[in-house]
Image (spheres, helix red, strand yellow):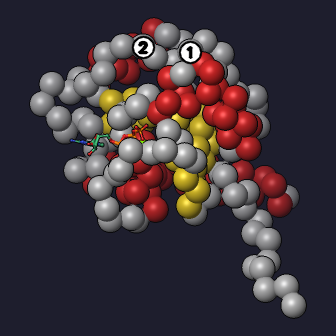
């Protein structure tokens, strides 16, 4: 007898976290799925609760883009993650250009750190043409995750609503 669970109405990959090495993707992923452990270096795609965590190398090395592009193609929401102490623009042109059925947003992480300048990072992203919503977060300041999560999950509910009506 087939014991596999009934197919979920949700895609296996609703959200994908992408961004440079050490940006804080896994730390954010763990916070979103309620995993209480320190992030280890990500070696491969990690799927949990409809969220996909990706290794920074997929983003930083053009020869690995194909893996990232396939993952992005399957996701409905793409979260670009960038550290608040990283003042280099790193988005490759076109990589996160998404069609109308996808949502793009950014999380500027580590805003608790001394030397963090989320405003400067936000300006950098805007100057590079990133026009989607940007949230400033720190896993050490849970209140900063509230608006980020509200937007993330609210838009998913809207998508589900649209999909079923
Ligand atoms: N202070 C502070 N440190 C953070 C925060 N988020 C992540 N870090 C730290 O930043 C480092 C890298 O975090 P990861 O979550 O492993 O980064 P990643 O983007 O998953 O990196 P890769 O898996 O290599 O692509 C770790 O030492 C984290 O503890 C934050 O909000 N505040
Ligand atoms: Mg990681």
Residue 136 higher or lower than 139, as above or below: above
Give the position of the C terminus as an image quadrant: bottom right
Q: Nearer the viewer, residue 29 or 163?
A: 29
Q: Secondary structure at mark 2?
A: loop
Q: Quadrant of residue 65?
A: top right
Rounded to the nearest angstrom, the CA distance separating label 1 from label 2 is 9 Å
Tell me: 118 left or right of 131. Answer: left
Dividing the image into four quarters, tell me where ligand 1 lies: top left
Residue 117: image tag = none
Residue 127 placement (x, y as % from top left): 45, 9
Residue 119 placement (x, y as % from top left): 29, 21
Residue at the spot x=31%, y=16% of the render?
87
Residue 89: image tag = 2
Q: Secondary structure at mark 1?
A: loop
Residue 83 placement (x, y as % from top left): 33, 30
> Is the residue marked by circle 2 packed among few (<14), some (14-19), or many (20+) residues within 10 Å?
few
Give the position of the N terminus as an image quadrant: bottom right
Q: Nearer the viewer, residue 163 or 75?
A: 75
Q: Residue furthest left?
A: 114
- Residue beneath disc 1: 92
Residue at the spot x=73%, y=57% of the render?
11
Q: Nearer the viewer, residue 135 or 64?
A: 64
């Amino acid at each position: 007898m087939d014991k596999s669970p009934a197919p979920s109405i949700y895609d296996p990959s609703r959200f994908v976290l992408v961004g440079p090495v050490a940006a804080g993707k896994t730390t954010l992923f763990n916070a979103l799925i309620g995993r209480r452990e320190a992030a280890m270096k990500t070696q491969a795609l990690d799927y949990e609760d409809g969220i996909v965590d990706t290794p920074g190398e997929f983003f930083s090395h053009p020869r690995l883009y194909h893996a990232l592009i396939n993952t992005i193609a399957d996701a409905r929401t793409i979260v670009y993650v960038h550290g608040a102490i990283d003042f280099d623009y790193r988005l490759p042109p076109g990589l996160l250009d998404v069609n109308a059925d996808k949502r793009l947003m950014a999380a500027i992480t580590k805003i608790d750190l001394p030397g963090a300048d989320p405003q400067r990072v936000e300006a950098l992203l805007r100057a590079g043409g990133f026009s989607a919503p940007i949230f400033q977060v720190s896993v050490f300041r849970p209140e900063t995750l509230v608006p980020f999560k509200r937007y993330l999950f609210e838009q998913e509910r809207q998508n589900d609503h649209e999909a079923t009506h």
